[in-house]
Image: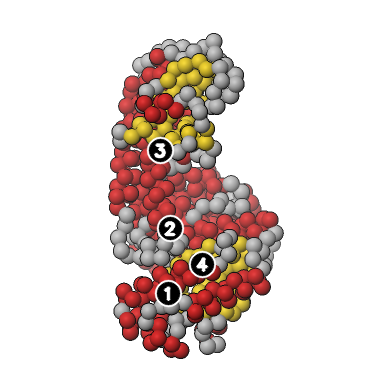
């Protein structure tokens, strides 16, 4: 894929040369005419390109030579147009980016069907991302995607493919690109793409298997395998349900309609317990004529409502989860439905021979549920159970992918997601936030002297001391190597400095085997602290904390510096 992009460089330069023209030309020719391309395809490509640019910018993937000027301003404008951003982590955004990029490549192929050629920047920016770019983003690599091609492609799409007049810039009052951003970008669009990305099981599982590796010591393959197997079982259950359901006729409909099949597809693709419950009950109510329902899961003291922490105790439905038998009844008083007489139907939701929950629906007491209703619910139950199993496995795999195995702290991926969410909340509510970078001093000396096993033991000790020294509301992460970071929600500059100084002193006082060989005879740390400033991006507060850490190192180590 990279070679294909490289091969396009010549075309880009050729187009640039044609558009700019020789400097000595006294009368530059008029600008080429706009292309004749289907407007709906151009519009679709523009929207997708804006989404891709926004996500890449959000992931700090772009690099801009010089760091200033129109490309940076334009990228910031695109990114801001999609605010507020959904509170999702990098894994979800990378999955959405992959899906958007594949759709963008389809738009490119359609454009090429109606045009002889595409301008170089469009040819490059609408092409599929190189195979290793998603992996690099998942590994935390940043600032490696050239921004110029994307900004130029957006300009060309907004102007229907017409470049600026040779030798000239576009007029300063030309707002065509801004108008395109206003037209095709807006709040909620990114959320729709991140949700859609979750529906693509193959992409999600591939990404999970690629980036769940935390530190090079092996992926959690059993959980990934469980997800893959769960997806296959769900697909089989969905098809079987549809085949069994299609010929049935009765009081509640003639056959499985397209809406129901689409709901089942979403059910099989979902990794969110609350969404699974919503979709399953939507299908159950449609097929049985119920007016309400709930998906329940076993809890130590009763039944937990799926998708929440609400626990219900003392219900007649508890016997369904203890016996594995369906329940058809009319109750006059039950904690699930309250004190009103109600007809209820409940079937156990089973996956891999284990009861995962109870699918329950209800309606008026003069319309008790029948064996046919029970049969319909039992056909839906395997798909629901498989979805719950996959959701549980996905949640476990995601949690493991966010934890550093040596120290049991959150890792850099977890930090990236938490920092974005915390900053967004702080800005919205007008609250302070602080962020600290902490680095063990002269740790290479320690490793070289005592070996990596002793080094790992020292890292674990320092991690524990830092975690014990912060406030209960603070979160500690292993940033990588011998670096740690602390997110301090609600902390002012003075409060953050006090907390981190307490941590520094605690590390210096801690007993670490082998520290007597360190410079000064103790294992120490240096730290840099930054607070929320005018620029609210996670990238910037991290950079300022890192710069303060560098100052602490250069000023003699074993100290805390505030940015």
User: Which mark is nearer the camera, 4 or 2?
Assistant: 4
Q: Secondary structure at mark 2?
A: loop
Identify which residue is drawn at 44% across, 17% down: 328
Q: CA distance from mark 1 to mark 4?
A: 18 Å
Q: Which residue is mark 2?
A: 402
Q: Which residue is mark 4?
A: 468
**Structural crowding at the residue carrying mark 3, measured as other residues with C-alpha within 10 Å and reported as few (<14), some (14–19) or many (≥20):** many
Q: Quadrant of the C terminus?
A: bottom right
Q: Quarter-wise, where is residue 12 in the image?
A: bottom left
Q: Quarter-wise, where is residue 247 in the image?
A: top left
Tell me which numbered mark, 1 or 4, is placed earlier along the sequence. 4
Residue placed most toward the observer, 120 or 492: 492
Q: Please say whether residue 52 is visible from this viewpoint.
A: no
Residue placed most toward the observer, 52 or 513: 513
Tell me which numbered mark, 1 or 2, is placed earlier along the sequence. 2
Q: Secondary structure at mark 3?
A: helix
Residue 166, x across and y down, in percent? 56, 67
Q: Secondary structure at mark 1?
A: loop
Q: Which residue is mark 1?
A: 482
Q: CA distance from mark 3 to mark 4?
A: 36 Å
Identify which residue is drawn at 33% across, 84% down: 449
**Structural crowding at the residue carrying mark 2, measured as other residues with C-alpha within 10 Å and reported as few (<14), some (14–19) or many (≥20):** many
């Amino acid at each position: 894929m990279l070679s294909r992009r490289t091969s396009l460089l010549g075309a880009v330069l050729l187009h640039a040369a044609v558009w700019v023209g020789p400097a000595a030309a006294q009368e530059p020719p008029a600008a080429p005419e706009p292309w004749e391309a289907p407007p709906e395809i151009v519009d679709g490509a523009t929207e997708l390109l804006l989404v891709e640019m926004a996500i890449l910018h959000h992931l700090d993937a772009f690099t801009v030579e010089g760091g200033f000027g129109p490309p940076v301003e334009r990228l910031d404008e695109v990114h801001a147009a999609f605010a507020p951003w959904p509170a999702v982590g990098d894994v979800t955004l990378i999955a959405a980016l992959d899906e958007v990029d594949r759709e963008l490549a389809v738009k490119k192929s359609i454009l090429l069907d109606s045009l002889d050629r595409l301008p170089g920047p469009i040819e490059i920016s609408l092409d599929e991302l190189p195979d290793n770019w998603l992996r690099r983003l998942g590994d935390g690599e940043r600032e490696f995607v050239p921004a110029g091609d994307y900004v130029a492609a957006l300009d060309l799409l907004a102007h229907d493919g017409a470049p600026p007049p040779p030798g000239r810039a576009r007029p300063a009052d030309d707002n065509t690109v801004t108008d395109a951003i206003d037209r095709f970008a807006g709040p909620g669009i990114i959320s729709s793409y991140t949700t859609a990305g979750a529906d693509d099981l193959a992409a999600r599982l591939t990404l999970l298997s690629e980036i769940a590796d935390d530190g090079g010591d092996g992926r959690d393959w059993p959980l990934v395998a469980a997800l893959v197997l769960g997806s296959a079982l769900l697909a089989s259950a969905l098809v079987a349900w549809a085949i069994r359901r299609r010929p049935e006729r009765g009081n509640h409909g003639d056959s499985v309609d397209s809406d129901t099949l689409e709901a089942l597809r979403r059910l099989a693709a979902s990794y969110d317990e609350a969404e699974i419950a919503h979709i399953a009950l939507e299908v159950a109510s449609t097929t049985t004529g119920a007016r309400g329902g709930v998906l329940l899961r076993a809890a130590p003291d009763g039944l937990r409502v799926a998708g929440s922490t609400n626990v219900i105790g003392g219900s007649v439905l508890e016997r369904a989860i203890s016996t594995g038998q369906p329940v058809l009844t009319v109750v006059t008083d039950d904690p699930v439905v309250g004190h009103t007489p109600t007809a209820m139907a409940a079937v156990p939701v089973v996956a891999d021979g284990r009861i995962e929950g109870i699918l329950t629906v209800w309606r008026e007491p003069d319309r008790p549920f029948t064996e046919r209703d029970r049969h319909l619910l039992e056909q839906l139950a395997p798909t629901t159970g498989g979805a719950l199993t996959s959701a549980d496995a996905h949640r476990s795999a995601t949690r493991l992918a966010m934890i550093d195995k040596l120290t049991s702290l959150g890792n850099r991926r977890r930090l990236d997601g938490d920092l974005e969410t915390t900053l967004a909340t702080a800005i919205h509510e007008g609250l302070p936030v602080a962020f600290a970078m902490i680095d063990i001093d002269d740790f290479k000396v320690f490793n070289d002297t005592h070996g990596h096993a002793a080094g790992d033991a020292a890292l674990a000790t320092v991690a524990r001391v830092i975690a014990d020294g912060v406030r209960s509301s603070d979160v500690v992460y292993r940033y990588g190597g011998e670096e740690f970071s602390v997110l301090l929600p609600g902390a002012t500059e003075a409060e953050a400095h006090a907390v981190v100084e307490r941590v520094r002193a605690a590390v210096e006082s801690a007993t670490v085997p082998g520290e007597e060989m360190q410079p000064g005879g103790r294992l120490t740390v240096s730290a840099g602290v930054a607070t929320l400033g005018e620029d609210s991006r996670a990238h910037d507060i991290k950079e300022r904390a890192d710069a303060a850490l560098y100052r602490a190192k250069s000023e003699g180590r074993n100290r805390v510096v505030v940015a």
